Image (cartoon, rainbow, N blue to C red):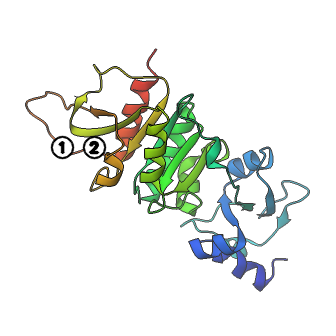
Amino acid sequence: MITKAEIQSVRALADKKGREEQCAFIAEGEKLVAELRASSLRVRKIYTTKPLWPEAEVIAERDMERISQLKSANSTLAVVESPKYDIATVDPTKNLVLALDRVQNPGNLGTIIRLADWFGITDIVCSVQSADCFNPKVIQATMGAIIRVRVHYTDLAKWLESQRDRGANIYGTFLDGQNIYKAEKSCCGVIVMGNEGQGISPECEKSVTDRLYIPPYPLDNPGSESLNVAIATAITCSEFRRG
């Protein structure tokens, strides 16, 4: 039987402060929890409303509703230890890396993590102003990709400058950039995606070596003012992975 203290502890993980204090996050859904059990991440506790695994604690549906962060509680919830990754191992001179500059919408971040997983990008470097990758909404949106994609937080402008100085190509999308479908692109480097409303910050823009542009169709009659950052990331990653 789950205790009141446990319920309070799990509910605290809805907030960033609670996640940082406990060094943990929550993941909901039988499929996602099953993936986590089989992964290298450490699952601290599993709560479920039906017998699934020997280590899982069966609780009442009303208690699951109390600890769930979903509008409609799922049957399974896990408390998972937050992984710690070494940003020094990220090498954009050998691999393609995503960098997110103040991407603040949890749904966008979760979708981008899922996109990175699809396109074989194992590292995402975020500015400290970006959404927390262990936010419950982000975790759900990744559809399990958080297990395979390493997300780092740092002073992004300084990190980009250091990678440019070591010879990495730094790509960014701008209205005055070169047509992404015609531009020469490398299989390695950093792709910088900017804030939902403001784009790439001036501080990060200083390190961009290659300015790209996703053109509308037709060119002389654009419809929407801009693309959602997750959609723009999908288009950009697809172009970089084109054979």
- Nearest the eye: 63 or 181: 181
Residue 26 rendering spot, x and y as whole percentages = 67, 63
Q: Which of the 4 quarters of the picture holds residue 59?
A: bottom right
Query: Taking 136 as reference, is 201 above or below it?
Result: above
Q: Residue at x 91, y 56 (%)?
A: 54
Residue at 77%, 73% in the rendered image: 60
Inspect this view and state whether residue 15 appears: no
In the picture, the quarter occupied by the N terminus is: bottom right
Q: CA distance from mark 2 to mark 1?
A: 7 Å
* Residue 192 position by quadrant: top left
Q: Which residue is mark 1?
A: 224
* Type of amino acid under label 2: Leu
* Mark number displayed over residue 227: 2
Q: Secondary structure at mark 2?
A: loop
Give the percent coordinates (x, y) of residue 191. 42, 37
Q: Which mark is residue 62?
A: none
Q: Which residue is farthest right?
A: 54
Amino acid type at mark 1 = Ser
